Image (tube, grey):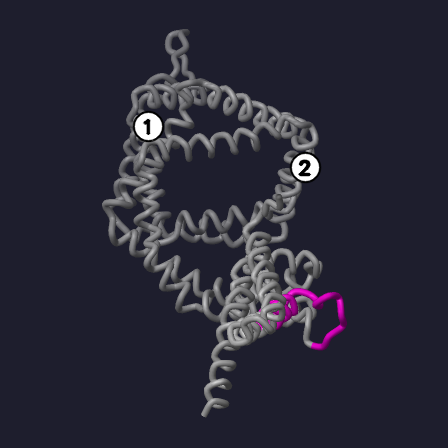
Amino acid sequence: MFKPQTPLVRMKAVASGLLLIAACLYITALELTHIYPTFASYLKAFSEAAMVGAIADWFAVTALFRRPMGLPIPHTAIIPRNKARIGSNLGDFICTHFLSREQVLAKVSEFDAAKRMSEWLSIPANATQLSGLAVSLAGHGVGALRDERVRQFVRTTALARLEQVDLARMSGQLLEVLTDDGRAQEVLEGVLDKVDAMMQSETTQQRIAQMIAAELDVLRFSVFGKEFSFSGMAGNWSSDKLVRKISTVISEVNADPEHELRKAFDEQLHTLIEKLKEDPAFRLRASQLRAQLVQHPALHGYLTGLVDDLVNWFETDIRSDDSTLRLHLNSGVLKLGEALREAPAMRSWINEQLLIAAGPMVERYRAQIGNYISERIDAWNEHELVEQLEAQVGKDLQFIRINGTLVGGLAGLMIHGGTQLLAGV
């Protein structure tokens, strides 16, 4: 006994079975014509019209996918012959009715991605999963640094970047930023305060006294045949005078924003910045220092050792049950989720940024999606395309054949009945 394997095959069998039943009824009607002429005429009309309807609808359904009976009948195999147009129209339909800017932005707005993200990040299991994934990915990346080819690439890239650095100009720009908006004077005041504190130190004063005494040790005089020296007393006196003088000057500078030393400091600093940024001699010297640094074996060894230490630390940490990195990441993810949950303004900002980004993305990729659909359908093998479409809608299309058989038969009955009625009249 035939056992249908798919819904499509089963429905085809039902539709074909009805056609076969109509044919049997037609043969029966012919046999009963001489015995029951009236009944036979109605049965013949029904079965004949049913067969016509069934065959016509079979032709219509089949013509969508292939040529009926392989005959080159015009306007058959409609889908295979027009697959390029179908693909283009389908792509346009999807882009117009499903991927319009307004529709996509409305869905993005309804989605409330920031709220969903904050809720998801606030769940400890999710935070652990995310941090574990991040550490795992980072572990693969850092582990690659053990490969000599990668190590060589890192060294070469780092040194190449260093060779391109304009040390003089960068130093000038950095110094300019650090000393802008009066910060240079703050630095000067801090340095002077440190100098004053250092000069007030007993240890510093003793060292100054010893230095001065050593210089004045040549000044000796003789009394009654015995030599005396002013070095010790002069050294202590000079040290005390020097410290007091320096403290006085520092106090004057700190108290007077317009002090000459402040102006001189600003001028010298400005001159140094301009030389670092523009003076060829300074830049040449910086380039020479950079070249010496790049070529120095110690730098190569330092970079290699730095990479090794980083890799060793990272791998040791992530293998540990109480990994510091994993714990910090996990804690950071949870705190981020909690912070977002408690900050509606931040969530609103995130959603706004997503909407801003989504608009151009829709416009940029919508046409590409339509083209992809069109190209994909056009590239399909005709047999593959027919199989895919028939598998999806073929079952429902068989109802056309079934309805055609039944409706055709009923129409035949009505026409025959009407004819008999008119003939009797």
Q: Nearer the viewer, residue 233 or 133?
A: 133
Q: Residue furthest top?
A: 225
Instruction: Residue at 39% x, 19% y: name it.
Output: 322
Provide residue 356's location: percent of width, then percent of height: 40, 63
Q: CA distance from mark 1 to mark 2?
A: 46 Å
Q: Is residue 55 magenta?
A: yes
Provide residue 160's location: percent of width, then percent of height: 66, 42
Depicted 22 relative to depicted 219: above or below: below
**Closer to the observer: label 1 or label 2?**
2
Q: Nearer the viewer, residue 152 or 120?
A: 120
Q: Which quadrant of the rendered structure holds the N terminus?
A: top right
Q: Is residue 298 left or right of residue 332?
A: right
Instruction: Residue at 28% x, 35% y: name it.
Output: 247
Q: Pointer 2: what residue?
A: 156
Residue 249 appears in view: no
Depicted 89 relative to depicted 276: above or below: below
Task: Determine crowd level at label 1: few under 14, some 14-19, many 20+ residues with C-alpha closer than 10 A.
Answer: some
Task: Determine crowd level at label 2: few under 14, some 14-19, many 20+ residues with C-alpha closer than 10 A.
Answer: few
Q: Secondary structure at mark 1?
A: helix
Residue 384 is drawn in which quadrant? bottom right
The span shown in magenta is 53-74
Residue 380 appears in view: yes
Q: Nearer the viewer, residue 196 or 274?
A: 274
**Majority SS type along the magenta span:** helix
Q: Residue furthest front?
A: 35
Numbered-mark total: 2
Q: Amino acid at mark 2?
A: Thr
Q: Pointer 1: what residue?
A: 198
